[in-house]
Image: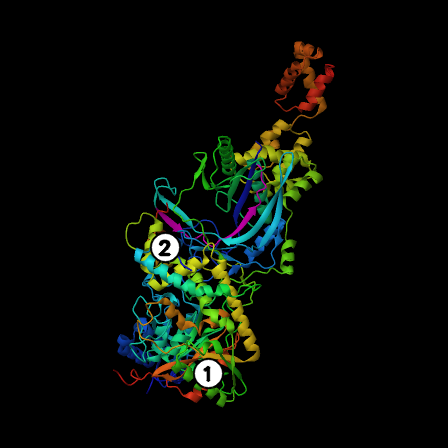
């Protein structure tokens, strides 16, 4: 029986109906991991023993007709930015290399309750800062479509794992595009929910007012299912919306006739690769053929999105990362210190990588006396303009679209010399985080053999509509998420 | 917006990061670049525009004043680099 | 040169909620290190704060008691700085939009009142505690420190006064009034020794109306220490100014043993706290209904009770102040009044002998072995002349030490006074008869003789004669007015 090419929803059904055991499914993915991990390096840590034990337990429960979660036995990769009790949570950093949390993140609790089997923790840019997963202390992850290229970031490990068949689905996190951009570069589906829809409790904070946890999957149905599992109000997160968990999968439909969709002008012209643009335009045509009214809209404040983001996010991060000081947990520098201040300075110098230090410096500067108004406060006002631009656009249109990434996967090392070039990878995704609205990336075609992502954005809490449009497109374009060269059957 | 080495040193001190001379120089350049790029926003008219700290309109999120179980002390110090008798140990403060 | 001392205070008080400000850990004093902690108050990666409703309510109650305006929409800010007792290396506090603002508290001095402006009352979280290990156990000269986060996250109300205080006496009186207010509101243990009430001061000397340089004074761990520290600092600054020296704007640390302030030397950087709005919390907008409900639970405040004691019970301001400055003492007094005895007498006993005994034995009045009704009993015995005032003091001591009731003690020891006029008269007659010289002295107006004769009467009656009656009779019989 083919297991590696099944969707998570399909696997859930097969396991529940006892057509295949949870253990067999887990073993299949563990074997696949063993086979391709040396080349892909999607995981920081794989927990085969624990995964098999979980799977066996589920099989026993099913055999005894005990109640099990709706997705019992379906394996999952979890981005190493989410707190998992008893299992290392490294955040891709030396700072937390040996850190073992004492509690589970809410999102982790919920997937566990649904019966998910954690295969391991997925690799990421250190503390979620990056767009290529080259900033991981544990070495980069490689794009399954071309091992010389990056999978995107910061949830590069999660994206690569799903694309390479090392997990049927995964959880990622998105602050400026960290779910959507790697999904785009790896040819899978990724969704950043409305800010506050998924609890941040247990999500190691990067930029608190922008971070969200979200699903990364092979197809739209799985995405809807996983969103349904993790979303919904959590009293442990003060920024969690009073929304109940919803059945996005159950309500999924491809009937999108009459929807009004506009492409964002500022994100679809200069700065976007021609090959990418070609696929985006083609997808717009598909929408038309489905009875969707397409148009173009200008959102002028978007031009300032990148600048605002690179002031707000580092500022919040500089504060969030202050807690890594070698006192209560994590890395502490070795040596005889004159005083605790020396210990702090050495610990943080040795524990953090260069990109993290760069952003901490930038953020600290932006908040420091004399510069607050000019940088941080000003950036928060630009944010208001972006929110208003979106608001006006959504008065006229149901959804907005754009490319997810200005390019397809670039080569490892290509953008590491100049931070600014790397930051430009996020121009399409950042405004979504700044406005707190939902955004999904759907693979819509190939450009020079590499996946192109189509971004769909909607007003707050419009996930169902976004998923529906993505579902309709998916059925039309029939994009095959299996990378050529690292296919399920082939081993090269 | 050019940043000086002194600026870099001051910020590194606030952020408690020890930097090598080379790092200071690199950061000085890179931070200057980013801030210069970001400076475009200073020319945008934001008169009368309020800042957005949250994209949510929520207020008054509270919890009731109830006691919940604390962690056992073994778990608390389980990740401690240096501990003694249940307390975290640090080099002297002054 | 006209000198005026200008003092402003910054006070922190731990609120006595059941749980901490942002998590459900127990918010009590003490316990083995790190036994009342969780991922939130330890600052574990991924943890998030959720506000304690009761703490916000308590702070609003305090603000209302201090006549402050309640801010319509207030937010929390992050105050960023590194210190080993800080779980997140930032403190969740309030900055430019605090919960309340612009109030006042009036303080009674001996012959005037001082209205002290309250700039703001806001809410924040407490830090952990450092224990310094080294020779002296003090921070200077320590080898290393041990960090305990039991206290981290306990809700802290911060009260900032305008620089309206003009002397260390006023500062002390203000702190006492504030402490009493907190006690009456029931929102804090307010024990400076346990750290649930803390105070820092800013003090400067204005010369000829021109503002002086502010010096911050820290580490004043009791009312007495605060008074001594401010007195010392005031003197230091005045002397310096007289000598033509410049006062440096700095933070000085009070050393209670040495009896002086000295500059606080630390390796911390200049304080740039880089405040920005706390993104993990949403704003607080106390609605009218909530504020009204809080107002409704406002108890009688110390000043109100003071006035009531003066007007209703006819107490002198000084005694009324003494009683009302400690809620339990005022409660004790009012319970004793129920006995029907003279309030002025009851007050005198409580503020005088009883207070002294309690202090000596370090027993709080709540645990006083003599209950209020028992004191009423004692005062009744004196009023009925069954025992003398002097005897009553001894009975009080006995009651305090044994817990027995005054009547019981008087009866057991046969202490009742002889208040039977004829019985005393016969003794007086006898004494006059057996002491003719003294009697003659009395007739001649020598007052010392009265003392002697009284002594004889007391001797003969083994101290039980009612002194007033005996004295009256002696005077009458010897025609000495």
Measure the C-alpha gap from mark 1 to mark 2.
50 Å
Q: Is residue A397 above or below residue C476?
A: below
* Left-right relation of C197 to A323: right
Tell me the quarter of the picture where residue A101 sits: bottom left
Considering the numbered disc 2 on the image, is that residue within a helix, a strand or a loop?
A: helix
**Left or right of A177, for residue C356:** right
Residue located 47% across and 71% down the image: A303
Q: Is residue C148 magenta?
A: yes
Q: Is residue C266 above or below residue A475?
A: above
Label 1 SS: helix
Which residue in the structure is indicated by mark 1? A470
Is residue A458 in sight in this rendering?
yes
Task: Judge whether A252 appears above or below B51 on screen.
Answer: below
Residue B5, numbered circle? 2
Q: Nearer the viewer, residue C292 or A62?
A: C292
x%, y% of residue A302? Answer: 49, 72
Whole-percent x, y for residue B63 in the image: 53, 62
Q: Position of residue C416 (x, y in %)?
A: 64, 29
Residue A315, image x, y percentages: 44, 61
Q: What segment is highlighted magenta in the picture?
A: C144-166
Quarter of the image where the N terminus of chain B is located: bottom left
Q: Is residue A397 magenta?
A: no
Q: Chain of mark 2?
A: B
Answer above or below: position of A351 versus A18: above
- Of residues A467 and C15, the one drawn nearer to the viewer in this rendering: A467
The reply to whether residue A100 is in sight is no
Crowding at dot 1, Cα within 10 Å, few <14 / some 14-19 / many 20+, comes out as many
Residue placed most toward the observer, C312 or B47 = B47
Numbered mark located on residue C393 in the image: none
Q: Chain of mark 1?
A: A
């Amino acid at each position: 029986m083919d297991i590696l090419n099944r969707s998570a929803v399909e696997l859930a059904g097969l396991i529940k109906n006892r057509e295949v055991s949870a253990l067999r499914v887990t073993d299949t993915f563990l074997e696949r991991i063993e086979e391709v991990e040396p080349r892909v390096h999607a995981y920081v840590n794989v927990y085969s023993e624990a995964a098999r034990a979980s799977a066996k337990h589920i099989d026993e429960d099913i055999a005894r007709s005990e109640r099990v979660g709706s997705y019992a036995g379906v394996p999952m990769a979890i981005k190493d930015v989410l707190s998992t009790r008893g299992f290392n949570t490294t955040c891709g950093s030396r700072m937390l290399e040996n850190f073992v949390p004492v509690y589970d993140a809410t999102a982790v609790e919920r997937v566990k309750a649904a019966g998910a089997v954690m295969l391991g923790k997925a690799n990421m840019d250190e503390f979620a800062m990056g767009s290529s997963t080259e900033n991981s202390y544990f070495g980069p992850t490689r794009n399954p479509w071309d091992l010389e290229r990056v999978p995107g970031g910061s949830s590069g490990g999660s994206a690569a794992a799903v694309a390479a068949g090392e997990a049927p689905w995964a959880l990622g996190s998105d602050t400026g595009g960290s779910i959507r951009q790697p999904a785009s570069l790896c040819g899978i589906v990724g969704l950043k929910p409305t800010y506050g829809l998924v609890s941040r409790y247990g999500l190691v904070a990067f930029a608190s007012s922008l971070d969200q946890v979200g699903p990364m999957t092979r197809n739209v149905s799985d995405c809807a299912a996983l969103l349904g599992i993790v979303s919904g109000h959590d009293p442990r997160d003060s920024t969690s919306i009073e929304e109940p968990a919803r059945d996005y999968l159950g309500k999924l439909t491809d009937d999108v006739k009459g929807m009004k969709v506009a492409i964002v002008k500022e994100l679809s012209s200069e700065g976007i690769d021609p090959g990418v643009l070609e696929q985006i335009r083609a997808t717009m045509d598909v929408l038309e053929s489905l009875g969707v009214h397409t148009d173009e809209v200008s959102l002028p404040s978007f031009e300032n999105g990148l600048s605002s983001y690179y002031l707000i996010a580092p500022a919040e991060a500089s504060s969030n990362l202050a807690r890594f000081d070698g006192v209560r947990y994590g890395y502490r520098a070795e040596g005889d210190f004159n005083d605790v201040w020396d210990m702090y300075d050495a610990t943080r110098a040795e524990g953090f990588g260069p990109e993290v230090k760069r952003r901490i410096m930038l953020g600290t500067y932006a908040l420091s006396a004399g510069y607050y108004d000019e940088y941080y406060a000003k950036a928060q006002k630009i944010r208001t303009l972006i929110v208003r631009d979106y608001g006006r656009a959504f008065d006229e249109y149901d959804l907005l679209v754009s490319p997810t990434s200005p390019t397809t996967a670039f080569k490892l090392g290509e953008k590491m010399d100049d931070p600014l070039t790397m930051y430009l990878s996020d121009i399409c995704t950042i405004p979504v985080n700044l406005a707190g609205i939902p955004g999904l990336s759907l693979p819509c075609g190939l450009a020079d053999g590499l996946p192109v992502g189509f971004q769909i954005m909607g007003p707050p809490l419009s996930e169902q509509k976004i998923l529906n449009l993505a579902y309709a497109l998916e059925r039309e374009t029939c994009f095959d998420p299996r990378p050529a060269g690292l296919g399920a059957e082939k081993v090269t | 917006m050019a940043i000086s080495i002194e600026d870099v040193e001051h910020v590194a001190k606030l952020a408690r990061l020890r930097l090598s001379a080379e790092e200071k120089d690199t950061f000085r350049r890179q931070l200057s670049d980013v801030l210069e790029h970001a400076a475009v926003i200073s020319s945008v008219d934001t008169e009368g525009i309020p800042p957005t700290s949250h994209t949510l309109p929520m207020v008054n999120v509270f919890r009731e004043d109830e006691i919940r179980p604390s962690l056992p002390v073994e778990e608390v110090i389980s990740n401690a680099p240096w501990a003694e008798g249940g307390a975290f140990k640090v080099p002297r403060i002054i | 040169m006209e000198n005026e001392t200008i003092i402003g205070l910054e006070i922190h008080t731990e609120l006595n909620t059941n749980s901490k400000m942002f998590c459900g850990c127990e918010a009590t004093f003490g316990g083995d290190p790190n036994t009342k902690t969780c991922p939130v108050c330890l600052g574990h990666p991924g943890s998030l704060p959720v506000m304690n409703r009761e703490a916000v309510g308590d702070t609003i109650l305090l603000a209302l008691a201090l006549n402050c305006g309640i801010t319509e929409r207030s937010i929390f800010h992050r105050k960023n700085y590194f210190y080993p007792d800080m779980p997140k290396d930032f403190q969740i506090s309030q900055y430019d939009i605090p919960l309340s603002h612009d109030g006042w508290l009036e303080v009674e001095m001996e012959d005037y009142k001082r209205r002290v402006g309250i700039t703001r009352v806001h809410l924040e979280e407490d830090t952990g505690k450092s224990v310094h290990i080294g020779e002296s156990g003090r921070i200077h000269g320590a080898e290393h420190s041990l960090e305990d986060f039991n206290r981290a996250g306990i809700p802290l109300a911060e009260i900032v006064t305008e620089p309206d205080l003009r002397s260390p006496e006023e500062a002390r009186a203000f702190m006492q009034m504030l402490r009493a207010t907190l006690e009456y509101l029931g929102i804090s243990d307010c024990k400076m020794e346990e750290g649930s009430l803390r105070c820092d001061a800013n003090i400067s000397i204005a010369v000829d109306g021109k503002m002086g340089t502010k010096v911050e004074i820290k580490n004043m761990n009791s009312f007495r220490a605060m008074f001594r520290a401010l007195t010392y600092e005031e003197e230091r600054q005045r002397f310096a100014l007289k000598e033509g020296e410049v006062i440096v704007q700095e933070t000085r640390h009070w050393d209670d043993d040495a009896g002086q302030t000295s500059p606080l030397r630390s390796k911390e950087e200049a304080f740039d706290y880089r405040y920005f709005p706390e993104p993990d919390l949403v704003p607080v907008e106390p609605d009218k209904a909530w504020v009204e409900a809080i107002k409704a639970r406002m108890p009688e405040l110390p000043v109100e009770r003071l006035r009531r004691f003066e007007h209703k019970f006819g107490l002198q301001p000084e005694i009324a102040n003494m009683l009302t400055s400690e809620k339990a003492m005022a409660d004790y007094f009012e319970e004793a009044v129920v006995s029907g005895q003279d309030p002025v007498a009851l007050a005198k006993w409580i503020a005088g002998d009883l207070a002294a005994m309690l202090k000596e034995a370090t027993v709080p009045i709540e645990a006083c072995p003599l209950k209020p009704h028992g004191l009423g009993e004692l005062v009744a015995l004196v009023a009925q002349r069954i025992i003398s005032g002097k005897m009553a003091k001894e009975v009080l001591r006995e009651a305090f030490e044994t817990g027995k009731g005054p009547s019981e003690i008087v009866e057991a020891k046969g202490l009742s006074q002889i208040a039977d006029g004829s019985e005393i008269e016969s003794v007086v007659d006898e004494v006059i008869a057996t002491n003719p010289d003294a009697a003659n002295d009395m007739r001649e107006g020598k007052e010392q003789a009265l003392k002697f004769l009284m002594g004889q009467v007391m001797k003969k009656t083994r101290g039980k004669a009612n002194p007033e009656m005996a004295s009256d009779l002696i005077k009458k019989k010897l025609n000495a007015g």
